[in-house]
Image (cartoon, helix red, strand yellow):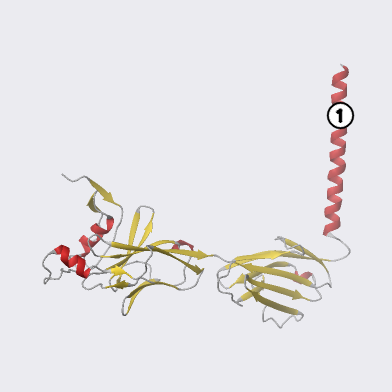
Amino acid sequence: MWNVKWLSAFFCIANIKCSMLIVPETKSPYDALWHELSSSYPYTENSNAENASEATLIHEPFFEETSSQVNVTAQLGSDVILHCRVNDLREKMVMWTKRKGEQMHLITTGTSTYSSDSRYSVEYVPPNDWQLHIKYVNERDEGHFECSISSVPPLVFVVFLEIIVPRVEIVDERGLQTPDKFYKSSSTIELKCVISKIPQPTSYVTWKHGSRLLNYDTSRGGISVKTNLNSMGAVSRLYIANANKNDSGNYTCSLGDSAQTTITVHVLNGDLNPAAAQQSGTANFSKQFVHLVVLISFLMTMNQLR
């Protein structure tokens, strides 16, 4: 009697209903998947071989990649192609799955795609490349993708996909990220946006004041944007001359649709200096702290005299 366990992988193919498979404990999940698939996509061993072992020795398929796993990196929002090159496939079939913990999700079999996610598709490129295409990758796509062959036992090749999420920061003069910046009326606003973790540098950096795009704004005048690319990413600077109260508000630096950050700009009239106000607040706090220390010392002294 076989000991059995539930395989927590659901899939739909052709006219086969979605179902949970019961698999012998000694077999891999791939055996169960291929067994279910075989009813729609039958294959046979070479009939000219004297026996099954000889057929396996002669016609066993193999992956062109010598290692069992490769790592692929992709920028958030880009399109990616995962390669699975199989030699001597003959009548066998290739399947792409995505592993999430103990669960295995069927994506493609042969040239057919069964994923409900329309971003996924498969393409066979002769002579041996079974490509899994993923459009507009997001963070949920990161993980282990497995390309398997319907041999006995199934052969598995793993591709780990890492998604690089760009980092966008608006920094002050010290290079530290800050949520607010203060400017005097009639001064020049200068905002610096640092973009890092970009495997493929891009110049598609935009600035907005509220919902208004500033990169090509000519209605106000005195607005300029300068973006410099480097090996680590990009640095973009926004300049607004002769600032006034109408220039106060939220400013957003964005890298396409991938990442963005926002800062609040305050344009102040008169000589009010936030730095001075902060120093004043610090001084008041210091005085209060000194008074508290003196009071505690006095109470301790009185307690000792009792």
Q: Quadrant of residue 200?
A: bottom right
| In this rendering, position of residue 242 left or right of residue 219 | right
Disc 1 packing (10 Å; few <14; some 14–19; many ≥20): few
Callout 1 secondary element? helix
Tell me the kind of residue under disc 1.
Ser
Quarter of the figure that contains the N terminus = top left
| In this rendering, position of residue 180 left or right of residue 63 | right
Question: Where is residue 51 shown, x and y percent of the image?
Answer: 12, 64
- Label count reads 1
Of 236 and 67, nearer the camera is 67
Residue at figure coordinates x 24%, y 58% from the top left: 31
Of 158 and 114, nearer the camera is 158
Task: Name the outermost residue toward the top.
Answer: 306
Task: Name the outermost residue toward the bottom.
Answer: 218
Is residue 44 shown above or below 216?
above
Read off the residue under disc 1: 297
| In this rendering, position of residue 137 left or right of residue 37 | right
